[in-house]
Image (cartoon, grey):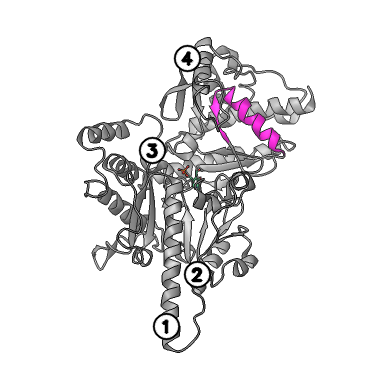
């Protein structure tokens, strides 16, 4: 770990002079005792927009359906955890493309396979085999067995001395939403299969069928699964759902970590339950091990499938390949959905499922034009080969714990702004604030000091940088955050 004050000073020296200001903070003595004061002055002001940029943005705004609130600059290039705008202003990127750029921006290895494959075969549809989608599926399945997940404890790549090749299957998609959409279709079909088998067994014994309507899907408040009509129906957040109602029928809301409510929500009518083991957009809220175990048990009791949406928290972000991979197997799901970091920014997603799910999906049941094509699956193969190694994952854990420990000090330093300890694991962390408006202000204050972070959920600042982020970069991020907090503290004080 770095000596903080030395590092703070060193980083300050590498910034433009305007950023460096070691002011005496007598007005805020408690915070001044420890918080970094090197970044009190803004260096990247939102309101200083060069004329050429203003002109371009106005031209684009005239023809773009805008659903995003964006600052007035245009990002042009990146490297590792840094990005630069068209005027060469440097930003430290702790948004990671919203948890996407796992290997960092402009990664050489990614660029090399991308270039090579783009000269060989980009797309050939799913009517023909290609060289890479099967290889990627194989790698994902083997790495899951080796590192733990989907019912496999870590370290089970072999059965009786030979590679265990069965057990799991993968379907490729183009995004997180599409992965969830596919998973929702698969659980519906599985539910119909279970109901049909039960009905047939009941009819043989002359018993009335328990139900032929095993179609309900349970999902959780504050979860986020995407914006298509199916995925949106599973996303119980009013701001996303209300403008587009009525949604798809058959979705049932439940409350994360409320073990007592599970039996009421998950019934014989349930075909599937979907949740994020760590809710990302909802505010970095983690499902407890006991809750996941109880949910698993209840799904088995009623013959429903358990789906983990690891689109944001999976693929190495927690320091394990899967966020659930470090948990005992009696907490594991039947299906995992993934996307974001899979190809480090190229659009690709996947649904990985146990064989019992795959067995009910028949030829023609589902399909996609772009999913599983050679360009994105070759890049994803490269990315997963690098992510799913013990040294890479231990780097994530170690920088994650460093970042967590620095963020843990903020509640004591700024009790009226920061509501408590950081939430999350590895490099998916959130700091709770006492008010939502403080979060928006901090995101801006940090951006104006050259560090990009995100908000999420209720009053939470989110840190989801590239997984290659260094401890020095984590140090700088929190130093800037401390200076931003000092600035906000003074604003709140009215100084
Ligand atoms: C947990 C989770 N699921 C699904 C999605 C939707 O993914 P996409 O935007 O790739 O469709 C997201 C996106 O933020 C997500 O965080």
Which SS class for mark 3? loop
Check if mark 2's residue and mark 4's residue have beta carbons within 8 Å: no
- Tell me the CA gap for discs 1 and 2: 16 Å
* Label 1–label 3 contact, CB within 8 A: no
Residue 25, x across and y down, in percent:
73, 22
Q: Which residue is mark 1?
A: 201
Q: Residue at x 42, y 66 (%)?
A: 190
Q: Which residue is mark 3?
A: 344
Who comes first in sequence, dot 4 or dot 3? 4
* Mark 2 or 4, nearer chain start: 4
Q: CA distance from mark 2 to mark 4?
A: 57 Å
Tell which residue pokes out farthest to the front in this image.
246
Gap in angstroms between the C-alphas marked 2 and 3: 37 Å
Q: Contact, CB < 8 Å: mark 4 with mark 1? A: no
Q: Magenta stretch?
A: 435-454
What secondary structure is found at the residue carrying circle 2?
loop
- Viewer-nearest of discs 2 and 3: 2
Q: Residues within 10 Å of mark 1 (few under 14, many from 20)?
A: some
Image quarter where the C terminus lies is: top right
Outermost residue to the top: 51
Please tell me which residue lies in front, 271 or 364. Answer: 364
Checking the image for residue 87, the label placed there is 4
| Image coordinates for residue 476, horizontal then vertical, percent | 54, 28
Residue 214, disc: 2
Q: CA distance from mark 4 to mark 3?
A: 25 Å
- For label 3, the crowd category at 10 Å Cα-Cα, with few meaning under 14, some 14 to 19 and many 20 or more, is many
Specify which label sits upstream in the sequence, 2 or 3: 2
Asked if the residues shown at circle 4 and circle 3 are in contact, with their CB atoms under 8 angstroms apart, the answer is no
């Amino acid at each position: 770990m770095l000596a903080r004050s030395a590092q703070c000073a060193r980083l300050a020296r590498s910034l433009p002079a305007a950023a460096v200001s070691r002011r005496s903070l007598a007005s805020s003595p408690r915070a001044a005792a420890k918080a970094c004061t090197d970044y009190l002055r803004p260096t990247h002001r939102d309101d200083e927009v060069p004329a050429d940029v203003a002109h371009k943005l106005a031209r684009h705004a005239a023809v773009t359906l805008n659903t995003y609130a964006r600052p007035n600059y245009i990002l042009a290039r990146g490297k590792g955890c840094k990005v630069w705008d068209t005027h060469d202003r440097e930003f430290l990127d702790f948004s990671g493309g919203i948890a996407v750029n796992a290997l960092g921006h402009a990664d050489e290895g990614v660029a090399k396979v991308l270039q090579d494959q783009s000269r060989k075969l980009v797309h050939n549809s799913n009517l023909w085999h290609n060289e890479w989608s099967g290889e990627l599926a194989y790698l994902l399945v083997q790495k899951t067995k080796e590192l733990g997940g989907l019912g496999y404890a870590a370290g089970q790549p072999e059965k009786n001395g030979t590679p265990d090749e069965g057990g799991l299957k993968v379907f490729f998609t183009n995004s997180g939403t599409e992965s969830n959409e596919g998973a929702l279709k698969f659980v519906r079909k599985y539910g119909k299969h279970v109901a049909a088998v039960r009905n047939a067994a009941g009819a043989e014994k002359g018993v009335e069928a328990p139900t032929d309507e095993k179609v309900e899907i349970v999902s959780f408040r504050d979860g986020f699964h995407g914006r298509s009509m199916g995925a949106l129906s599973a996303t119980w957040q009013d701001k996303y759902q209300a403008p587009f109602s009525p949604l798809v029928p058959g979705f049932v809301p439940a409350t994360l970590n409320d073990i007592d409510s599970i039996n009421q929500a998950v019934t014989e009518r349930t075909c599937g339950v979907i949740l994020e083991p760590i809710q990302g957009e909802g505010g970095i809220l983690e499902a407890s091990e006991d809750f996941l175990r109880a949910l698993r048990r209840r799904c088995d009791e009623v013959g429903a499938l358990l789906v983990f949406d690891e689109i944001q928290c999976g693929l190495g972000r927690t320091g394990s390949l899967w966020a659930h991979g470090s948990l005992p197997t009696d907490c594991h799901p039947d299906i995992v959905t993934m996307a974001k970091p899979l190809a480090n920014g190229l659009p690709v997603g996947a649904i990985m499922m146990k064989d019992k799910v795959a067995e009910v999906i028949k030829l023609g049941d589902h399909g996609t034009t772009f999913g599983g094509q050679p360009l994105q699956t070759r890049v994803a193969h490269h990315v997963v080969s690098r992510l799913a190694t013990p040294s890479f994952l231990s780097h994530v854990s170690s920088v994650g714990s460093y970042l967590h420990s620095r963020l843990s000090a903020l509640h004591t330093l700024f009790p009226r702004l920061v509501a408590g300890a950081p939430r999350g694991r590895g490099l998916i962390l959130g700091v709770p604030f006492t008010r939502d408006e403080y979060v928006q202000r901090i995101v801006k204050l940090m951006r104006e000091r050259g560090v990009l972070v995100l908000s999420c959920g209720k009053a939470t600042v989110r840190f989801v940088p590239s997984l290659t982020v260094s401890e020095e970069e984590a140090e700088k991020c929190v130093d800037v955050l401390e200076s931003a907090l000092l600035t906000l503290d003074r604003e709140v004080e009215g100084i």
